[in-house]
Image: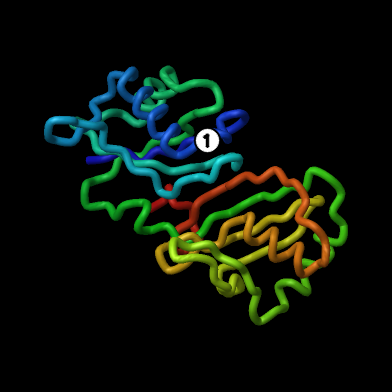
Amino acid sequence: MKMLVVYQKLGLHRFLGHLDLQRAMQRALRRSGLPVCYSQGFNPHLLLSFAAPLSVGIQGEREVMELPLGEPVAEQDFLRRLNAALPEGLKALQARLLGDDAAPAMARLEAAVYTIVPREAAPELLAAVPGFLAQTAIPCLRKTKSGERMDDLRPLVYNLLVKQGALHAVLAISERGTARPDQLLASLAAFAGVAPPRCAITRAALLDGRMAPLEDP
């Protein structure tokens, strides 16, 4: 059996890198006394998987991780014990006990929902959204291990709208292709003919192939 956990990463914890987040969760799980599982061998480590790493500087409102358990634990008891060991800014919101045959969250992940709030007025950027989406192709410069290449961002932008002065985007995030919010901002700003503004970015949800929350298998 395994536990699927929805958690948030807010405030100053948005500056934690993925490895630091892993260490913080592992420490909290050890302190909680929950019946978590460890790898075998000379250097056993706690088995823990995250659906999608979160870039440094981006907040996460409903992030997803999974961990195998050595014995069943009531979901509310799991939340209480884990939250008692987590630092402020990291909080487990929901726990769901699943069978070992449940598909991994990482394998079911298809998209992410982002809220992008400019820190200063950006009327030209926001006004450019309809024309930006009307393009049949959106050129985007990608950095790879072998160098830089131009790519098409358009198939990876599932939705983009403006609401109350903020951008709300649904972007692909899977093995077949991923669009990052910074890439979206750079391409939109280039289309609008303005410099990319400083923005507060929050990943609001992770979605599966049904465009439903990843935590609802």
Name the residue rendered at 47%, 67% in the picture. 177
Direction bottom: furthest residue: 136
For badge 1, the amino acid type reads Gln
How many discs mark residues in the rendered view? 1
* Image position of 81 (left or right of 137): left
Circle 1 packing at 10 Å, graded few (<14), some (14-19), many (20+), is many
**Residue placed most toward the observer, 77 or 43:** 43
Seen as rendered, the residue at the extreme front is 147
Image quadrant where residue 85 sits: top left
- Residue in the image at 31% along x and 52% along y: 104
Residue ID at (62%, 30%): 11
**Position of the N terminus by quadrant:** top left
Between 14 and 133, the one lying in front of the other is: 14
Image coordinates for residue 165, horizontal then vertical, percent:
81, 51
The picture quadrant where one finds residue 66 is top left
Residue 72 screen position, x and y as percent: 23, 31
Q: Is residue 212 above or below residue 29?
A: below
Which residue is tagged 1?
Answer: 8
Work out whether residue 192 or residue 207 is closer to the camera in this orientation and state it: 192
Residue 179, compared with residue 203, is above or below; it is below
Q: Residue at x 31, y 38 (%)?
A: 48
66 horizontally vs 143: left or right: left
Q: Position of residue 203 (x, y in %)?
A: 58, 47
- SS at mark 1 in the image: strand
User: Where does residue 172 sit, x and y in percent of width and height?
Assistant: 52, 63
* Side of 45 relative to 133 (left or right): left
